[in-house]
Amino acid sequence: MRLGVCSACLPELTPHQAAEAAAAAGYAGIEWRVSTEAGSQGPAHFLRNNRCTLRPLRQRTICPSAALAKQVVGHLPPHLVGVIYDPGNTVVEGSEDPRLALQILGEHLAHVHLKNAAYERAEGGGPWRPRWTTMDDGVLDVPAILRLLESAGYRGWVSVEDFSTDRPPREALAFNAAYLSDHTTFESAAGGRP
C-alpha cells in the first residue's frame, strides 16, 4: 500500500506548501482537491475557502496545452504532482506537436489519454467543428504518438478515451485494444496491471 493525503484537509496550505509538507512527513502522494474556486485571503476552510486546490486542467480552461500545464505544476515535485497528457483534446484547443508536448512535460507526465478527432464543416457552412472519431481515423497519428511515448521512456498508463459512436462499446473496446497493440507493447493484465 502507499500512504497519501487528501489536499482538502490542508486548507491553509498552497499546493506547493502541501507538496513539500506531505513529502517531509513521508506521504507518497496527494489526492488533489480540484475546483474552479481556489482559496482566497479570508479564513481557510475545508470546503469554502481551501487554498490547497488545483484548478481543473481540461478543455475550455486556462491550461489546454502541455506548456500551460507545465507552468502550473512545473514548480512542484513530479513524484507528487503529474499531468494527464491528452493529445485528442489538443485537437479541440491547445494544439502542440506531440513531440514538443512530451518534451515540455518531461517527468511531470503521469498519465496518457488516447482518442482521436477530426474537423467537419457545420451543415450549411460556417466554421469547422471538431468531432470525435475512431482511433484510426482522425487528425492525430496515434501510432506515431505511441512511438514518441516509447522513445521518451514512458512506462505509465495509457487509457483509451474513445468518444466516437461508430462502434458499439464492446466492439470499440476490442478494436482499440487490437489497434493500439499492433503499434506498441503493453504489459499484460495479469496481476491487475494493464
Image (tube, rainbow, N blue to C red):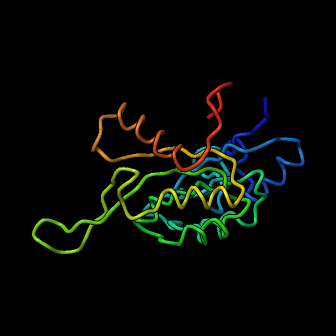
45 or 30, nearer to the observer: 30
Q: Is residue 130 visible?
A: yes
Left or right: where does residue 117 sit relative to residue 194? Answer: left
Compared with 14, 179 (above or below) is above
Residue lying farthest to the bottom in this orientation:
126
| Residue 32 placement (x, y as % from top left) | 65, 47
| Residue 159 placement (x, y as % from top left) | 53, 44
Left or right: where does residue 29 sit relative to residue 120? Answer: right
Compared with 27, 105 (above or below) is below
Left or right: where does residue 146 sit relative to residue 89? Answer: right
14 or 78, nearer to the observer: 78
Residue drawn at point x = 67 percent, y = 69 percent: 103
Compared with 102, 44 (above or below) is above
Residue drawn at point x = 29 percent, y = 39 percent: 167
144 or 16, nearer to the observer: 144
Residue lying farthest to the front in this orientation:
182
Left or right: where does residue 56 sit relative to residue 75? Answer: left
| Residue 123 placement (x, y as % from top left) | 12, 65
| Residue 190 placement (x, y as % from top left) | 65, 25
Q: How many marks?
A: 0
Q: Quadrant of the N terminus?
A: top right
Residue drawn at point x = 14 percent, y = 73 percent: 125
Q: Is residue 43 visible?
A: no
Q: Quadrant of residue 8?
A: top right
Q: Quadrant of the C terminus?
A: top right
Residue lying farthest to the left in this orientation:
124
